[in-house]
Image: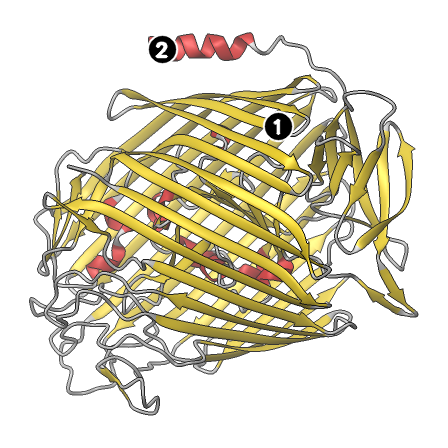
Amino acid sequence: MKKLIVLALVFLATINLEAQDQIKGKVLETSQDGRLIPIIGANVYWQNTSIGTSTDLNGIYFIQMAPSFPATLSVSFVGYTLDSKEEVDGEYIFYMKPSIELEEVKIKGNLNTTKTSLIDPINTQTISTGEIQKAACCNLSECFETNNTVDISYSDGVSGIKKIQMLGLDGKYIQITSELIPLIRGLQRSYGLSYIPGSWIESIQIIQGAGSVVNGFESFTGQINLEYFKPHEESDKLNWNVYANASGKLENNLILTKHNGNWRSNLFTHFSYFDRELDHHGTHHDHSDHSDHQGDKFLDMPRSKHFSLLNRWKYFGSEKYRFQINFRAILEERIAGQITTDESITDPYLINVDNQIIQVYTKLGKIKSDKKSIGTQTSFTLHNQEAKFGRNEYSGLQESFSINIIEQNQLNDNHLIKYGMSYFSDRFTESFQGNTNYSFLEKKRVDLVTGLFSEYQYQKDNFNIITGLRADYYNIEEKVYYSPRVNLKYNPGDRTAVRLSGGRAFRISNTIPENMNFLASSRTIIIEDDLQPEIGLNYGLNLSHCFYLLGNEATFNLDIYRTEFEDQIVVNIEKQDQVSFTNLRGKSFSNIIQIGLEYKIINNLQVRLGYKKNRAVSTFNGIEAQLPLQPEQRGLINLSYKTISDKWHFDITGNYIGKSRIPNDIASTEDYSSSFILFNTQITRKWDNFDLYIGGENLGNYTQSNPIIEPENPFGENFDASLIWGPVMGINIYAGIRYKIK
């Protein structure tokens, strides 16, 4: 505690440092009907220097004063040219227009739907609505089908859940936030990705490696932050998306926006329904004859009912104060397991998962001056989860509160400092019984984490550095966990950025909710006493380069990262009859190298290529081994074409998934899985306020053979539906409409 007090005094000593002026402004597009639309991600910079910034979601930018005068402030954005500029109340406003106009047809230009900044010192990639709409993207876990950074994998053979990975490790090591407020934590680690409809999302920011200490302590491999649509004046009053697939699943998403007055609001609603018993895959699938399918009497896709609601209220009545409050509610029922229409099954293996979530979160900010501001973020969450997998039964209740207070000071032209405090309170009440050595009833655990943090940013010419330190006190361990982080960026030229990053993180594991897929087996679940918080170090390098090839723009990215664990909860499935959760005794690390290339082949035809090689190792029973069910290699190719009128969009994506190590099991003598390729495509027809799209997933109809071990004897000692390395569902044809009212 003495260390915390000393650190607090250091933080407070920075508050009285004075800041110097910086320039604030906006970058706007003037539409044909005269409306002013903010341009997101426009580059604003001083000519003949490396000092620059980019606009936020409101088209607003802040940039430090030029190192010397006279100087010229400029703006650039792909597909747009400068129309005019003016100064209004001390703000410098740029008005942009599309580069090409043909009579009455306005050409918006080839705007990149995924952007990588050369200015941000943190390795950040931004996915826009246009990228999300290249596929069905029913929920957040499916928003990365065309992305080379985040991988989509499969949870088990019965629940229908997809999960994500980054830098070669499971998604639980990614900090997932909603508008920088913690979103998926605790019990939501199992199914939380499926509770965020893709049609609600305006943009997604992906940070690789060590991020900012301001956002929390749980970021090992990176951070995913999603932004919902905002109630701005230019927002659609109504946005409606309806989806249906050939299997019979229906989804309805509706966004209503009130964008006038001091209090503006979004109402997001989602409803999905599927109530058919499909059993086309499982026991046998001859990949040379796609008409040869036999079911295993287990549902290929669970029956489900899901309702989500999000209501945002944002205050626009003050230039000095900012406030918003958000209400979120989720109800879901998921039923899987053996089919119930087969009379020969007298004691069916059934899976029932029910989730109810209520969340309220707020943001309050005060602009003290052009140089100083302070903000507060709070979140309240109540989550009740009931899960039954055959004879394994789990119930959990999570009651959480968090607060984050951040103050920002611009010390002078080159120096920015942020500091503040955070507090996380999580109370868990859990019960578990079944195939385990560790049954418990109404077991309670209260996690209290109190933190202080400070972050310093230096920027001059072509060099940026962000250094930060967190100190978090965890009540159960009675220990302070320190998380230093650093991000460096150097621009050797105006088209190249080199970044180095390193940082430490820690997290508190929730064993059963984070590994719910292993409940779908007869494995004995062994949980070691006194499991420790996980601690890891991540460091790496990023190279981003923009260039022209045959007169067309291209972007190249190279990422090399390593994650090392000091302490980790090891999930050990090396013995076919058990899964054990133990503290790490030995080494655990992940090395990854990935490259990406985006290139405009011809006008309106864009290609994206990606490749990554991964080596993730942990220590199992005293022996270092590659993580099971983790592909060693992945590849991506995405082709996007749209007509010059912007009325037709064509997208096709191929994902190569390399071989994965398979732990010992009775169903196979192979040590590694097969590699395979998945193809997805979508065609979209656009009108002024109406889109019609049709697409297909897994066009090759590839499925994993024998995804469930001994499905005919689900209560026997060898049953296992958790060893999944490939898809369990075949081809999926879908269609949908998007309709909006301005």
Mark 1 burial class by Cα count in 10 Å: few <14, some 14-19, many 20+ = some
Under mark 2, the amino acid is: Lys
From this view, report whether residue 508 is shown above or below residue 405. Answer: below
Give how far across and how far down residue 168 sits, in percent.
35, 50
What type is the residue that disc 1 sits on?
Phe
Residue 306 occupies quadrant: bottom left
Specify which label sits upstream in the sequence, 2 or 1: 2
- Seen from the viewer's position, the closer of residues 111 and 185 is 111
Q: Which mark is residue 630?
A: none
Mark 2 Cα-neighbour bin, 10 Å: few <14, some 14–19, many ≥20? few
| 470 is higher (above) or lower (below) than 131 | above
Q: Quadrant of residue 401?
A: top left
Q: Give the number of the disc on residue 3.
A: 2
What is the count of numbered marks?
2
> What quarter of the picture does the N terminus occupy?
top left
Q: In this view, does 482 lie above or below 735?
A: above
* Residue designated by label 1: 463
- Answer with left or right where residue 677 lies relative to residue 437: right
When the figure is inspected, residue 625 is found, relative to residue 299, above or below; the finding is: above
Classify mark 1: helix, strand or loop: strand
Q: Is residue 297 left or right of residue 382?
A: left
Q: Distance between the residues labelled 2 and 1?
A: 32 Å
Residue 643 point in image, percent of width and height: 73, 74
Q: In which quarter of the image is residue 128?
A: bottom right
**Along the line of sight, the residue nearer the viewer: 487 or 421:** 487
Quadrant of the frame with the C terminus: bottom right
Using the rendered image of the protein, determine whether residue 598 is visible from the camera's viewpoint: yes
Label pair 2/1, CB-CB below 8 angstroms? no
Q: Is residue 216 visible?
A: no
Circle 2 sits in a helix, a strand or a loop, which is it?
A: helix
Where is residue 546 shown, x and y percent of the image? 64, 49
In the rendered image, residue 76, in percent from the top left (x then y), is placed at: 78, 45
